[in-house]
Image (cartoon, grey):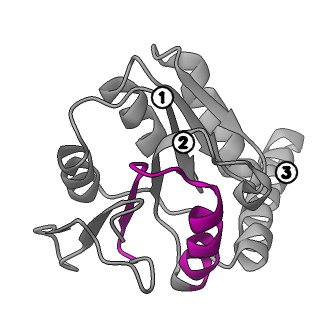
Amino acid sequence: MTYLAIVFIFLIISCLASIVLWTVRNGISPMPTAKKVKRALLTTLPPACSGHIYELGSAWGTLALALAKKYPQSQIWGYETSPIPYFLSRLIQHYSTPTNLTFVRQDFFAVDLSKAKLIVCYLYPTCMQRLKAKFEKELHPDTLVASHTFAIPGWKAEKIVEVDDLYKTKVYLYKIGAT
């Protein structure tokens, strides 16, 4: 085996180990949003939104990139703690055209969300329960929260869209003050 092959195998194993470690730490693996779900989510969101837009748990950055293209007048912030997906997100950002997209390697629970006009997330039920308290404390009336697959416990969605996919994935749209 050549030295280059050994280095390549080591890098692959290190990347996989990092993803597994951060999956255990975060409680969820960095999963991209499926195309049909992304399309349904983007269609469910209002055609215009000016202000700060946050994707919590941006993983590989593909949904944040789509948000940046849909809302060129808004600043999009993608938050991710897992280093490999974050690094790849930054590569996507570097080679894409939107200038309104910023990826941050930070725990979104430590971020002040009070400037948000729209929050988008694809997280797990326990995290959604924790976010509920943060949203109720920090978000202003009329802030929109869109979540796919997992609802915010105890909140009534303003709109629920069922995606025509294998899992009948649901997209939930909430408006702060209407819950």
Q: Compare residues 59 and 43 and report the one nearer the observer.
A: 43
Give SS at disc 2. Answer: strand
Q: Give me the residue at 44% from left, 33% from top.
A: 65
Q: Are marks 1 and 2 in contact (CB under 8 Å)?
A: yes
The numbered mark, 1 or 2, whose residue comes first in the sequence reads 1
The residue that mark 2 highlights is 116
Q: Is residue 47 above or below residue 37?
A: above
Mark before the other along the chain sequence, 2 or 3? 3
Using the numbered discs, state the Cα–Cα distance from disc 2 to disc 3 in whole angstroms. 46 Å
In the rendered structure, the answer to whether residue 158 lies left or right of residue 79 reads left
The three-letter amino acid code for the residue at tag 1 is: Gly
Is residue 133 rendered magenta in the image? yes
Q: Which residue is mark 1?
A: 51
SS of the residue under disc 3: helix
Question: Residue 138 placed where, x, y %?
Answer: 64, 56
User: Pointer 3: what residue?
Assistant: 6
Residue type highlighted by circle 2: Ala
Point 26% across, 53% down: residue: 41
Is 156 in the magenta? no
Residue at the right extreme, as displayed: 3
Q: State the extent of the magenta-drawn residues as a range.
A: 126-150
Q: Considering the numbered disc 1 on the image, is that residue within a helix, a strand or a loop? A: loop
Residue 34 pos. (x, y %) = 32, 58
* Marking on residue 66: none
Query: Rounded to the nearest whole Å, what is the CA distance between mark 1 and mark 2?
Result: 7 Å
Which label's residue is closer to the chain start, 3 or 1? 3
